[in-house]
Image: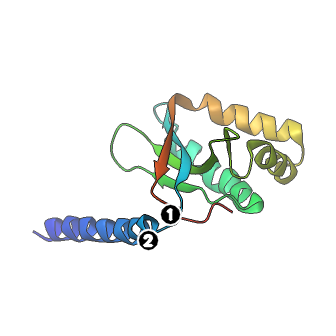
Amino acid sequence: MERRRFAALRAVLGIAVLVIMVIPSAFADEEQSYLVLYEKFKPGKAHEGIKIIKEHFIPTDKKVGRKVIPFFFNTGEWDTVAFFPYDASRKDTIPSFGDWWAALAQLEGGQEQAKKLFDHFMDLHSDTRSEISTSPGQIMPAK
């Protein structure tokens, strides 16, 4: 009985958070595009992959001012999904992937270390999928 109450409370809180995030965007002046990246790690590698995201990639996003919206799944087909503000006219994230990579290299101590980390991270994957989506307005400011 207590488990059902907890599950129901989590569902209600989840819906409330989504409403708080989405309703204001419905009244924004312009649409915002996002690059949506789904990631599935090899069996037993999700914890390591998510640790790299949290300890290396999110600090890099913060350094360049990227307003990425990450989710780490507890159930389902995918382990993570992230929404990156996207400039459809330039076909690049906001800020650009080049700016992000330069910041990663700086934080990791050089291009070689950044490449080694990124290659290792990619080796942890069994599948990825990316899509472009559009919200009615900015959920979070792009910059």
Q: Secondary structure at mark 1?
A: loop
Most foreground residue, 138 or 57: 138
Q: Residue at x 48, y 44 (%)?
A: 133
Name the residue tied to disc 1.
139
Instruction: Count how many numbered circles sit on residues in the image.
Output: 2
- What amino acid type should be assigned to the residue bearing mark 2? Pro
Q: Residue at x 48, y 48 (%)?
A: 134
37 w.r.t. 65: above or below: above
**Quadrant housing the N terminus:** bottom left
The structure's colour scheme is rainbow
Most foreground residue, 134 or 76: 134
Q: Is residue 80 left or right of residue 54?
A: left
Q: Is residue 140 left or right of residue 108?
A: left
Q: Is residue 105 left or right of residue 5?
A: right
Most foreground residue, 100 or 131: 131
Quadrant housing residue 101: top right
Residue 24, numbered label: 2
Residue 122 in picture, x, y percent from top left? 63, 32
21 w.r.t. 49: above or below: below
Quadrant housing residue 58: bottom right
Determine contact: label 2, label 1, CB under 8 Å.
Answer: yes
Residue 79 in picture, x, y percent from top left? 45, 42
Q: CA distance from mark 2 to mark 1?
A: 7 Å
